[in-house]
Image: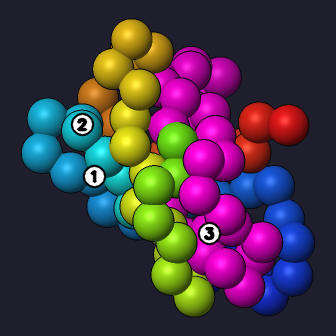
Amino acid sequence: MLVAGRSNHAQVAKVGPRNAFVVINFGETHGAVPNQRFTVKRGSAVLATVEISLTKEHYSIAQVLPETLSGNIRKGDAATLIH
């Protein structure tokens, strides 16, 4: 888990069926709010852009924007907040 406090980085904790959504370890305690967007990467490869649809204390559910999907997302992939 991330340390409490605001951060721009998170990780994918779970991937929904057919890469429709992800759960990221970035929640309200980290400053998460609905509609924030993240870039999901593995190494230098950009896999998708996701948008938070639901926030909880320690995690958020983010919908994968289908037009941005360019690979299969896996648990542990990096998610970086887009400013």
Q: Is residue 46 above or below residue 24?
A: above
Which region of the structure is painted magenta?
24-50
Q: On residue 26, which mark appears?
A: 3
Task: Identify which amino acid the numbered label 1 is placed on.
Answer: Val
Mark 2 is surrounded, within 10 Å at the Cα level, by few (under 14), some (14 to 19) or many (20 or more) other residues, namely some
Which residue sits at x=67%, y=63%?
33
The residue under label 2 is 19
* Residue 20 locus on image (x, y percent): 24, 38
Q: CA distance from mark 2 to mark 1?
A: 6 Å
Q: Secondary structure at mark 3?
A: loop
**Residue corresponding to mark 1:** 15
Question: Which residue: 12% across, 45% down?
Answer: 17
Residue 77 falls left or right of residue 16: right
Seen at 31% across and 61% down, the residue is 14
Horizontally, residue 83 falls left or right of residue 19, namely right
**Is residue 73 in the magenta section?**
no
- Check the image and report above or below for 69 versus 83: above
Around disc 3, counting alpha carbons within 10 Å, would you say few (fewer than 14), some (14 to 19), or many (20 or more)?
many
